[in-house]
C-alpha cells in the first residue's frame, strides 16, 4: 500500500442514488477551490510504502484466491487525469465557467496541479515505487514489444518503462483551441516522461485528432460512444489504435436487441477497415444490464464472431 498519493484534498459531495444495489450514482460536488489562496490546498505529500499493510493485504488475498489466481503486488501506475479530478474539488460548472470568466485562474490551477503531479512522479521513481509488467492500460491491453525500455531494472522501474494515460472528459464540449490551451499543453510534459500513452475516455475526440498528434508517445486514442466513427477512423488512419468503446446503452434497454448490437459493431469495423485503422473493441461504462448478465455473454459472442469473420475475409 502506497500512501501520500491524494494531493491532500478530500472530496465533499452529495449523492443521488437511484438503485441501492448499483454503485453508479449522481454527484454534486462542493467547491473547495474558489480563490488563488485555495490553490495551496493542492499539496505534494511524501509517498511512502506501508510494507506491513501490503503484506497483510497480500496474505488475505492469497487465502481468498488460493488455487484459483496468483496474487502479486504492484507499484504505482500513475496517470494524468487532471480535470477528472479537479471537477470533484471544484464542480463541473465551476470549471467550465472559469475557462471563460477566469482564464488566468484556470492556468494557475493547471500549473499547480501539473507541477505537483510531476513532483510526485519524481518521488515515486526515486523511491522505486513505480509498478511494471502492465497487462492493461485504461481497460485495454497494454501488451507491447516497445516496453520496457533499455536499462530497465525490475526492482526500480522508471516512467519510461511504463504506459500512462490521460483525459479531460469535462472538455467534451469545449473548442479544440481551449482543449489545447487549458489541457493538452500541460499534458505534453507528462506524456513525454512515459514510454507509451493512451489518450482519452468518454469525451468525443474525432474532431481533435490533430491536437492529440502533438502529445508525445500516444499509441491509442479512445473512440467513445459519442464520436463520429467515420470521421475518427479517417483522421486516425494507421497511426494510432482506434480504441473503440461501443455504446453500453445497448445493454441497458428494456428489451435486448442483438441486431442493434451487431450493426453498431459492424459500423466501427467497416470504417476502420476503410481507413486502415488498427482497432480494439472495449465494452465499458456499463451501468446496468437489467439484471440479465447473459446480455454481456451475447455481446461478446457477437463481437468475436464479427472480428473472426473480418480476419478470415
Image: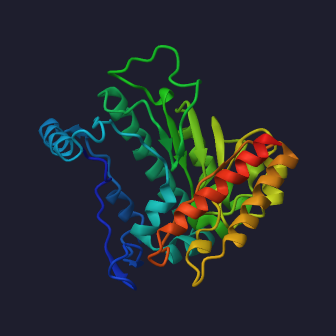
Residue drawn 24% across the image and 38% down it:
67
Name the residue at 63% across, 50% down.
184
231, 259: nearer the viewer:
259
The x, y position of residue 29, in whole percent, is 39, 76
* Between 168 and 261, the one nearer to me in the picture: 261
Colouring scheme applied when the structure was drawn: rainbow
Quadrant of the rendered structure where residue 298 is?
A: bottom right
Instruction: Identify whether 101 is placed above or below 133.
Output: below
Q: Is residue 207 visible to us here?
A: no
Q: Is residue 278 above or below residue 229?
A: above
Rendering coords of residue 222 (x, y %): 64, 53
On screen, 24 above or below 310?
A: below
Q: Is residue 185 in view?
A: yes
In front: 228, or 166?
228
Q: Residue furthest top?
A: 151
Q: In the picture, residue 71 is in which quadrant?
A: top left
How many numbered marks are there?
0
Residue lying at 32% horizontally and 21% vertically, measured from the top left: 155
- Residue 239 placement, left or right of 144: right
Q: Which of the image's four quarters has the N terminus? A: top left
Front residue of 312 and 271: 312
Quarter occupied by the C terminus: top right
- In the shown orientation, is residue 18 left or right of residue 192? left
Residue 173, position as x, y percentages in the image: 67, 70
- The answer to whether residue 226 is left or right of residue 60 is right
Which x, y percent locates residue 64?
20, 47
- Residue at 43% over, 30% down: 133
Amino acid at each position: 500500500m502506497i500512501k501520500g498519493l491524494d494531493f491532500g484534498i478530500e472530496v465533499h459531495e452529495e449523492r443521488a442514488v437511484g438503485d441501492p444495489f448499483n454503485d453508479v450514482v449522481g454527484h454534486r460536488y462542493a467547491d473547495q477551490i474558489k480563490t488563488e489562496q485555495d490553490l495551496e490546498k493542492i499539496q505534494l505529500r511524501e509517498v511512502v510504502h506501508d510494507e506491513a499493510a501490503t503484506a497483510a493485504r497480500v496474505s488475505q488475498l492469497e487465502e481468498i484466491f488460493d488455487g484459483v489466481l496468483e496474487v502479486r503486488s504492484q507499484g504505482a501506475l500513475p496517470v494524468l487525469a487532471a480535470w477528472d479530478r479537479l471537477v470533484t474539488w471544484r464542480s463541473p460548472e465551476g470549471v467550465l465557467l472559469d475557462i471563460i470568466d477566469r482564464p488566468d485562474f484556470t492556468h494557475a490551477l493547471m500549473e499547480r496541479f501539473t507541477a505537483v503531479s510531476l513532483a510526485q512522479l519524481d518521488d515515486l521513481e526515486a523511491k522505486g515505487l513505480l509498478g511494471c509488467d502492465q497487462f492493461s492500460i485504461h481497460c485495454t491491453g497494454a501488451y507491447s514489444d516497445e516496453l520496457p525500455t533499455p536499462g530497465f531494472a525490475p526492482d526500480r522501474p522508471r516512467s519510461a518503462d511504463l504506459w500512462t494515460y490521460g483525459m479531460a472528459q469535462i472538455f467534451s464540449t469545449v473548442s479544440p483551441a481551449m482543449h489545447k490551451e487549458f489541457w493538452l499543453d500541460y499534458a505534453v510534459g507528462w506524456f513525454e516522461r512515459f514510454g507509451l500513452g493512451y489518450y482519452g475516455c468518454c469525451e468525443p475526440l474525432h474532431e481533435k485528432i490533430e491536437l492529440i498528434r502533438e502529445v508525445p508517445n500516444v499509441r491509442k486514442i479512445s473512440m467513445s460512444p459519442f464520436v463520429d466513427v467515420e470521421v475518427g477512423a479517417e483522421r486516425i488512419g494507421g497511426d494510432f489504435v482506434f480504441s473503440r468503446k461501443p455504446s453500453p446503452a445497448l445493454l441497458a434497454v428494456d428489451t435486448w436487441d442483438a441486431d442493434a448490437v451487431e450493426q453498431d459493431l459492424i459500423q466501427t469495423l467497416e470504417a476502420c477497415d476503410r481507413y486502415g485503422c488498427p482497432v480494439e473493441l472495449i465494452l465499458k461504462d456499463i451501468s446496468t444490464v437489467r439484471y440479465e448478465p447473459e446480455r454481456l455473454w451475447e455481446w461478446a459472442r457477437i463481437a468475436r464472431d464479427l472480428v473472426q469473420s473480418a480476419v478470415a475475409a
